[in-house]
Image: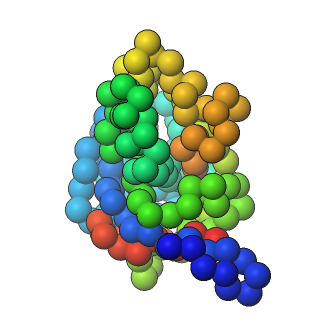
Amino acid sequence: MNQLTNNKEISSGRLFQINISGGGVPKKSVDVCVVTNLGIVGDRQNNKKVHGGPQRALCLYSLELLLKLESEGHPVFPGALGENLTVTGIDWDLAVPGSRIRIGDNVLIQVTSYTSPCKAVRKYFKDEENDRISDKAHKGWSRVYAKVLQAGDTKIGDVVLID
């Protein structure tokens, strides 16, 4: 649901899935989590040069885009592409660097960049064409990285507000 507040468009949705792993993909679903300035407690990344850290504490992706990718024949599912938070119901076109996203009552994050698809997710694309989620190749289809402005706990089903 989109609305206009103080001349700013705000999009409202829900947190569909929270995903963590001990490193690599796919990330597995958990019902609740604690978000810190370095990401979700219990989540690990294999390659710290390109994943993780304060500016890439969280990776987010849209459930609607995952479903469209699946309808194109890609064997994707929530968590397969390494996203920590799979969101639904928001206008993904608003998830751009600089936008702020509130998750539930406690967590506030800011999108820092689009992600580049890494080789670990190739197996989730027919013909291993992972550039399907590259912002350079397909504008609006990228996952996004975010930094944490306000840490806290969150759970599946929490309201997600993006502006």
Give the farthest residue toward the right: 7
The reply, left or right, for residue 101 in relation to residue 85 is: right
Is residue 83 or residue 36 the one in the foreground?
83
Q: Residue furthest top?
A: 127
Asked if 97 appears above or below 163 in the picture, the reply is: above
Does residue 79 appear in the picture of this structure?
Answer: no
Q: Residue at x 41, y 75 (%)?
A: 159
Q: Position of residue 22 (x, y in %)?
A: 30, 39
x then y, percent, for residue 92: 56, 55
Viewer-side residue, 85 vs 88? 88
Instruction: Give the residue drawn at x 38%, y 43%.
Output: 67
Residue 122's image quarter? top left
Pick the front one: 163 or 30 = 163
149 or 99: which is nearer to us? Answer: 99
Image coordinates for residue 163, horizontal then vertical, percent: 64, 71
Position of 36 with respect to 76 (left or right) is right
Direction from residue 15 to residue 142 in the image, left or right: right
Task: Identify the residue at horizontal 33%, vertical 60% (top origin).
Answer: 16
Q: Is residue 9 above or below residue 23?
A: below
Q: Quadrant of residue 26?
A: top left
